[in-house]
Image (tube, helix red, strand yellow):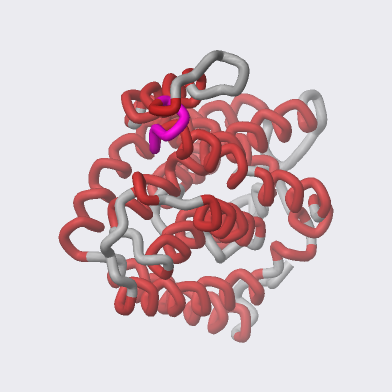
């Protein structure tokens, strides 16, 4: 860390967070890459990234409010001990509610176990660039060869667990939370839109919990980004993220994921080139 991030730098980071959070390109990687190019030359850190994600997840809650309410009501109606009917227990939305809960456990457990590594060693830009390229190519293969046939209503327990571990891969900057879950969904045969929608839903518990945990942990503690600029970045991320959701779902439905695959690979090689030329530092 070489300086403290200013208000306008935080605003720029919030804009970038809002643009990239829902795209399969890794928002944490973009914030990590942009840091050295700011006048302060500062990596905003994992805590700043997690807190600003509260803004983007609020956008998800509002955009998918009808889906979330429907799933929540079905889940409550099917809880054991409530006298739920067989039909209520068999409701796909009730099962989806349980799958979101179970699928959130891997990233929560691994995030706590490897918290130090996530906030330090795993932010190495060589690793970030490599993950951008490798997982970009995997996403491309999944998009090309996936069956694109299954809706979310067909999701099984095994699929929900796989989705959960795929999301946990995003603890490494460059993998992308949405990219990991979408790739897993495509590989299991889900439609492009179903995989994207589930990645949004699955992220809610983990990202919101992580954001508030980091907010609590960093409260009153001096860091690279002060409380005011962090709040500004979070607000900007919310408004930008809401618009990106609508655009992203349209792109996925009509063009697939190849534009993001190409972007990831190119960005990864650009970062490696900048590192090798000594323009930016890996740490």
Please say whether residue 38 is visible from this viewpoint. Answer: no
The residue range painted magenta reads 88-92
- Left or right: 257 as drawn, with respect to 275: left
Answer above or below: position of 276 versus 120.
below
Toward the viewer: 140 or 10? 140
| Residue plotted at (57% across, 55% down) | 167
Q: Quadrant of the C terminus?
A: bottom right
Answer above or below: position of 92 versus 231.
below
- Left or right: 216 as drawn, with respect to 151: right
Query: Residue 28 location, x and y as percent?
Result: 57, 54
What type of secondary structure mainly makes up the magenta span? helix
Q: Is residue 160 magenta?
A: no
Answer above or below: position of 52 versus 31.
above
| Residue plotted at (55% across, 36% down) | 98
Query: Residue 14 location, x and y as percent?
Result: 48, 40
In which quarter of the view is residue 85 placed? Answer: top left
Please say whether residue 14 is visible from this viewpoint. Answer: yes
Query: Residue 19 location, x and y as percent?
Result: 38, 48
Q: Residue furthest top?
A: 82
Toward the viewer: 232 or 256? 256
| Residue plotted at (49% across, 81% down) | 269
Q: Is residue 91 magenta?
A: yes
- Left or right: 210 as drawn, with respect to 114: left
In which quarter of the view is residue 245 placed? Answer: top left
Q: Residue furthest front?
A: 86
Count the marks: how many?
Answer: 0
Query: Residue 215 location, x and y as percent?
Result: 70, 29
| Residue plotted at (66% across, 56% down) | 171
């Amino acid at each position: 860390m070489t300086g403290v991030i200013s208000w306008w730098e935080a605003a720029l980071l919030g804009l970038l967070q809002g643009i990239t959070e829902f795209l399969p390109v890794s928002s944490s990687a973009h914030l990590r890459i942009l840091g050295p190019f700011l006048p302060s030359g500062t990596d905003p850190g994992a805590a700043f990234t997690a807190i600003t994600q509260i803004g983007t997840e609020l956008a998800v809650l509002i955009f998918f409010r009808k889906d979330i309410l429907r799933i929540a009501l079905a889940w409550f109606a099917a809880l054991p001990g409530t006298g739920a009917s067989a039909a209520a227990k068999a409701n796909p939305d009730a099962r989806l509610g349980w799958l979101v809960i179970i699928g959130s456990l891997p990233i929560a457990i691994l995030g706590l176990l490897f918290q130090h590594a996530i906030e330090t060693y795993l932010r190495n830009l060589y690793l970030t660039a490599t993950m951008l390229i490798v997982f970009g190519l995997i996403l491309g293969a999944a998009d090309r060869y996936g069956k694109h046939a299954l809706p979310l209503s067909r999701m099984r327990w095994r699929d929900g667990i796989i989705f959960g571990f795929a999301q946990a891969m995003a603890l490494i900057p460059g993998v992308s939370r949405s990219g990991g879950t979408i790739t897993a969904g495509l590989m299991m045969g889900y439609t492009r839109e179903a995989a994207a929608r589930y990645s949004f839903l699955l992220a809610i518990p983990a990202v919101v919990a992580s954001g508030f945990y980091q907010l609590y942990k960093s409260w009153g503690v001096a860091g690279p980004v002060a409380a005011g600029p962090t709040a500004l970045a979070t607000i900007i991320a919310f408004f930008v993220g809401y618009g990106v959701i609508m655009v992203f779902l349209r792109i996925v439905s009509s063009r697939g994921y190849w534009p993001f695959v190409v972007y990831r690979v190119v960005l990864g090689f650009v970062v490696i080139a900048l590192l090798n030329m000594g323009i930016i530092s890996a740490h």
